[in-house]
Amino acid sequence: MTIAGGCQCGAVRYSLQGGPYPVYACHCRECQKQSASAFALSMPVPVQAFAIEGTLDEYCRPASGGRSTDGFFCPACGTRLFHRSSASGAFVTVKAGTLDDASNIQVRAHLWVSRKQPWVTLDPEVPAFDTQPEDMSAWRERLMEDAP
Ligand SMILES: [Zn+2]
Ligand SMILES: [Zn+2]
């Protein structure tokens, strides 16, 4: 199975082998700014399953412990396509709104609901964290193991 996506103008395209991959939503202020929306949709994918075509530009945001979160975007239209942490090269976090078809993504968790916009209503069946899991890396790994 191949899942495909790309930026708004079409200059950058990507494909994913396998999946469907689980997605989580983050409602923190950084994600609201980054996505220019109310929350970000993050889909962690093993780097070996991810193929990208086209020229990218990069924005590095300092994170805790001297790390950085690197955001990759299309220089022509500005669409943010995926993130990569300097702490781990094993996965990339695809911004799931850039999928060609995001209609059947599975949102498995909501993070930072303490920062959620009051007009966003969540499904009570989906786990929600006030902030984020204490060990984010381990939590993300478990989430990714759920992918077929
Ligand atoms: Zn573009
Ligand atoms: Zn966030």
Image: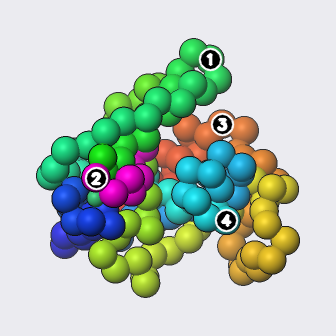
- Look at 50% across and 33% down and name the residue there: 69
Rendered location of residue 99, percent (x, y): 34, 70
Say which amino acid is labelled 3. Answer: Asp
Query: Nearer the N terminus, badge 1 or badge 2?
Result: 1
Checking the image for residue 76, the label placed there is 2
- Whether pointer 2 and pointer 3 mark residues with C-beta atoms closer than 8 Å, the reply is no
For the residue labelled by badge 1, is the local secondary structure a helix, a strand or a loop?
helix
Say which amino acid is labelled 1. Answer: Gly
- Look at 22% across and 56% down and name the residue there: 12
Magenta residue check for 108: no
Name the residue tied to disc 1: 65
Which residue is farthest left? 53
Crowd rating for badge 4 (residues with CA inside 10 Å; few <14, some 14–19, many 20+):
many
Distance between mark 2 and mark 4 Cα atoms = 24 Å
Distance between mark 2 and mark 3 Cα atoms = 36 Å
Say which amino acid is labelled 4. Answer: Ala
Name the residue tied to disc 4: 38
Against 132, residue 143 (above or below) is below
In this picture, which residue range is highlighted in magenta? 76-84
Q: Is mark 2 within 8 Å of ligand 1?
A: yes
Rendered location of residue 92, percent (x, y): 37, 44
Query: Nearer the N terminus, badge 2 or badge 3?
Result: 2
